Structure formats: C-alpha cells, structure tokens
Amino acid sequence: MRLLYILATYLLFPLLLPVLCLHRKTRHGLKQRLGFYAPGDIPPRGDGPVLWLHGASAGDLLALAPMFAPLRARFPGCQLIVSTMTDSGHAMAKGRLAKDIDGVVYVPYDLWGATRRAVKALRPDLLVLEYTEVWPNLIRAAKRGHARVVMTNGRFSPANVGRYRWLFRLIGNPLKDFDLLLMREEGEAERALQLGAHADWVKVTGNTKFDALASGASSDDEVLRGALGLTAGERVWIAGSTHEGEEEVLFGVYRRLLSRWPDLRLVVAPRYVDRAPRITALAREVGLEVGLRSTGNGARTQVVVLDTIGELSRAYRLGTVVFVGGSFTKRGGQNILEPAGQGRPVLYGPHMDNFRDSVALLTGQGGWQVADADALHTRLEELLSDPVRLESLGAQARETVRRISGASERNADAMTTLFPHGRAEPR
C-alpha cells in the first residue's frame, strides 16, 4: 500500500511541479522542498533534542508560536526548527518569529527521496504536524529516523471522513504512525478514532491559536500606529482579511459613515497583500484618499491599506471596531477570535461556514453577525456613537477568548510523556 502511494507521488509530481514553481504562494525554495540544504540553512545541532514544528502557512505558524516557550521550558536546550509550505509563511518566520526559533526551512515535497533527505539533514527527535497536515512519506521518514510524530490542533472535517477512510485503505493508514494526536475538540477526536487512530494516542487539548489571541500591547504598536498615520484616541475602523469583492461594499459603508464622523479612519488589511494595488485603485475610484503602510504614505489619508505580513493582530489593537472579511463572499470567513482577543468588538458577514465554532462562541459576547452592507452600517453607527459600550463589549470579547486558552501548555505536557529523558532513544 505504501509503495502505491510512493509510485503515485512520483508519477504526479512532474505534472504538479510547474504549477508549484509558478504559484505566488510556493514559487521559492525549490532546493529545500526537494530536501537539499545549503550551508547555513540548518543550525548546528546542540546537546538538546531537535523539535521540528510544521505549519503550512503564515497563519498556521502563528497558531504554533504559543507552544515555543512551553516546549523550551520542558525540553531545556532544545532546538526549534519550523517548516512551512508558503513563501509568506517562510518570510514571516524569518522576520516576526526569528527571535523565538532556531531555524526555518521549507517543508519537503511529500516524495520518498525528498522527505528522507530532509529528515537526515534535520535529525528531529520530534515532528509536530498541525491541523490536517498528514503527509505519509514525511511521517514515515521521521519514524524511520527514530523521531516521535505528533499532531496538534488536530481536525478532521465530518464531510471528509469518508474520503480519508477511502484514501487510507488505498495507501495505508498514516494515523497509525502518529505517537500522539492532540485534537481541538471532542468531535475531532471521535473522527480520529473512526479513521483508525488508537484510543491511547488521542487526546483533546484544544486549539493553540487561541493562546496567541490575547497578547498584550508592545512597543511595536506605536511604531505601527505611526506607519499607518494613526493618532492615539481617534476613531479607527479595521477591516481585516478582506477578499475580492468585499472592499467595494466596505467603501460604500465607509462613505456613509463619513457623513457623521468625517475624521473616521479605515484600515483595510487584505487576506492577500498582492491585492493592495487593486484596493487602492478601488478607493480612488469612489473618491477616497488612500495610502499604503509599506511605503509610509498613509499618513492622514482616509484609507490605509495594510500591505505587509504579520502585522494584522497588532493592527487590531489600534482599532476602535473591527470587521473580518471572507464573510461577505463564499470564502467561508476568516479568524474572528483574533481581534476579539485584542479586546475589540467584532463584526462579520453571513458566510462563516469555516468558523462556525468561533461564531457560536463569540456571537453575543462581543461579536455580531450582519446580513449585508445595510446591517453592517447600522451596527457600526450604533457602536461608534457609544464609546462606553464599545469599551465594555471589547472587554467582553477578550474575556471570551481568555476562557478557551491553555492548549499550548497542555500540548507541551503531553509531548513530555514521549521523552522521559528529554531526547528520543532509537527504537
């Protein structure tokens, strides 16, 4: 069965490679993706264990980040190496996360040779895969290299259980190679068991992304405030993770609000920063002054486009009220708990299918779901006219997020049970 998967990956890879090399998210790092590393790509190994944590994208790495400190506390002298699939994730790890990790690489393509070369080079004692990053060749290579393999923030969609079951019957069940599956919630754990995971390996520990949500203010906040041309105490509407087709709606609502609050500022943070030129053009078409954070020309413009990576959470702290995008389109929403964790009231549209648990948690607790542009305008008008209520609702949102935190500590505790002496022994 494993041989079938290995053969299939090599047959399909030549067809996929041109797409991977040209796609805006994965066009860099080809050598590392094939398991070849230049001098300096990987830090020299120390005396402690090597912990390899993989998150597919920038957002996934941010969800892993709260585990860095607990893991270092429990594995003194360890090296933390993170891998990612996207170029934006790699750039963020090199920048924002650099001080907390020891190295960053691109994850190898799930090819028999590439994964074995990567494992031989990194020599991990522990491989941590997040969400549904179940890569059979990588997992098997890590096990052959005597590493333990753990899933964190584990999730299996109910709609996909049948597909996973069919695939696992065809290629062999990679869940049997995991040492621990640390799942987000009870339903996810049940689905892991249905797919063949051993009951002793499955634990419900929560979602580490919640642990990063309620971070406090930092000196970098004022740097960002200045770069965006904002002034402390002024009204600021943050529209985060917006998608194509949403900015036109938001600009229409914003123009209506300006008639009552002419000093209201709007910060738009697109989900994909390469859309910034398109958004600035749209703003100018409807008569709005607009600038870019990256060029520093957003000072005192009505609209500022946050066209940088890794600053959205900090930007939320600078806002008065927040709208989260992906929810006025069929995208299925984006993370609404991130601004809530920064103590800001949060609005979101009707299409939140990918974040139903977050909607159930936050609605009525500092968050509102609005049906359309008119409803968004009405709610924003109510909130902006009542600063005391805004502050109270923001505090309520932050407390809601605080109650569901703690998964990072629980995950780190669970991982220590695999290494009673701080390092894996060959088996």
Image: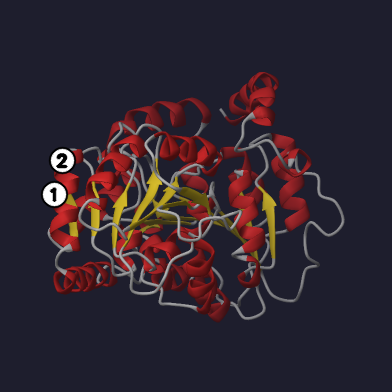
Task: Indicate the position of residue 77 as horizontal and vertical percent values.
Answer: 67, 79
**SS under mark 1:** helix
What's the residue type where badge 2 is placed? Asp
Q: In this view, does 200 lie above or below 253?
A: below
What's the residue type where badge 1 is placed? Thr
- Position of 123 with respect to 218 (left or right) is right
Q: Report the front residue among 268 and 310.
A: 268
**SS under mark 2:** helix
Q: Look at the image and tell me in which quarter the C terminus lies.
A: bottom right
Task: Indicate the position of residue 102 as horizontal and vertical percent values.
Answer: 69, 68
Asked whether the beta carbons under mark 1 and mark 2 sit within 8 Å of each other, the answer is yes
Q: Is residue 375 above or below residue 73?
A: above
Task: Indicate the position of residue 92 as horizontal and vertical percent values.
Answer: 60, 56
- Position of 102 with respect to 292 (left or right) is right
Q: Give the labeled residue for mark 2.
A: 374
Q: How far apart are marks 1 and 2 (CA)?
A: 6 Å
* Residue 173, visible in the rendered structure: no
Residue at 52 percent across and 79 percent down: it is 219
The colour mode here is: secondary structure
Task: Indicate the position of residue 412 as horizontal and vertical percent values.
Answer: 47, 71
Q: Report the front residue among 225 and 153.
A: 225
Quadrant of residue 264 within the rendered picture: bottom left
Q: Which residue lies furthest to the right in this view?
A: 39
The local crowd at label 2, few if under 14, some if 14 to 19, many if 20 or more residues have their Cα within 10 Å, is few
Q: Give the labeled residue for mark 1.
A: 378
Q: Look at the image and tell me in which quarter the N terminus lies.
A: top right
